[in-house]
Amino acid sequence: MTGAPLTEGAALLIVLLVGFLPTEIWRSLAVLAGRRVEEGSPVFHWVKAVATALLAAVVARLLFAPAGALAAVPLALRLGAVACGVAGFLAFRRSVFAGVLVGEIVLIAGIVLSR
Amino acid sequence: MSAPSASHPAHHAPAVWFLKGVRAGLSVPAIVLFASYLGFGAVLQSVGFPLGAGLASTLLVWALPAQLILIGGIAAGTALPALALAVALSSMRLLPMVVSVAPYLRGPRRSLFWELVCAHYVAMTVWLESLRLLPHLPGEARLPFTLGLGNMLIAVSMCGTVAGFLVAGELPTPLAAGLLLLTPLSFTVLMVRNAVVPTDWLALAAGFLLMPATLGLDGGLDLMIAGIGGGSFAYLAGRLLERRRRGRP
């Protein structure tokens, strides 16, 4: 975490204003407006692309600049484990569970073997 | 499961329907949610985010991608208004989900307040479970059933958040690293699964590749550049590809 660690109160305020409000507004709008949103509209496609890229960026951040115990693992092993997870997902009939399992096994085996 | 069939809708008090919803919440999706939030709790612990506020995010935000963007952005030092925009963009997908479930939540007597409360529980899991289960329930059962289901799944997820947070600091290194890998690993696999059109793949690649390139930048702009910049690039490039493909005889 950059800067001073957050206090519980400040963090709660951030969760309310930056997390809860920007999320809940869409759920409330859906009930209040209730109209069907055009899923094929250009705005909808743009938002979907941005949401995907945002999530991919956050995931990349967790892999390229991790904290805690993952930070001590070499970058190549972190990326390799995720690549093996995706390969496992594709190999085992597109099973998300199999993909996650393969990735975890590769990471943990890699850490234990490199000691 | 003891879901009543559509042909013989049983009549119960709302409290009974609530409890039936609670029981429907104890299912395979609950296990998946628990594991996902276990990873989220470990991420909270690793970046030094307070547990109470992290738990509040599970209860109040109740959308794991938005929660990850929130925590990741704070850890990266992103300006809060920019982060709010990022969270809003990531959560906009909830709108069509709620719109598609809303007709089931309108009971015989319409109550805007309870419809808004019920809408809060709609995220990927509750959305899928509602579309699967609610059509088979009598009208007056749907609202209390959804409340029971939603509260049960949130409770399970909050337990996962606490467990991940508490366990992350105690495990031996290989397992602690494995716990922290759970979130980026599962989300990568899920995004690969959900990618259908070229725009999806481009957005996935742009976000993933732009992030390490922007890591050194000041002001926590990395998330905005990789997310909004990368996503917009993917949208435009995807449209261009689509047009070129259509243009061909």
Image: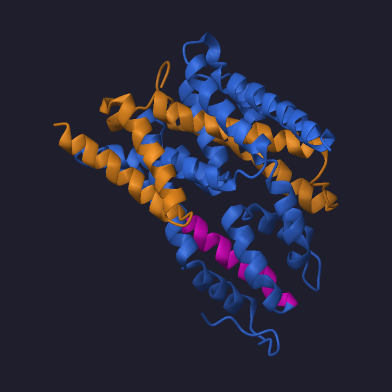
Chain colours: A orange, B blue
- The answer to whether residue B87 is seen in the rendering is no
Horizontal placement of B242 versus B3: left or right?
right
Q: Which residues are magenta?
A: B139-155
Of all residues shown, which one is farthest toward the front? B249
**Would residue B63 be counted in the magenta stretch?**
no
Quarter of the image for residue A24 reads top right
Residue A67: x, y in percent?
35, 27
Residue, x 35% and y 33% (percent of image)?
Answer: A80
B10 above or below B245?
Answer: below
Residue A92: x, y in percent?
42, 55
Of all residues shown, which one is farthest toward the left? A115
Residue B105: x, y in percent?
73, 65
Horizontal placement of A92 versus A36: left or right?
left
Q: Which of B52 and B8 lies nearest the eye of the viewer?
A: B8
Residue B88: x, y in percent?
67, 35
From the image, which quarter does the C terminus of chain A lie in? Answer: top left
Residue, x 57% and y 57% (percent of image)?
Answer: B125
Horizontal placement of B125 versus B51: left or right?
right
Predominant secondary structure, magenta span: helix
Of all residues shown, which one is farthest toward the bottom? B8
Residue, x 47% and y 11% (percent of image)?
Answer: B216
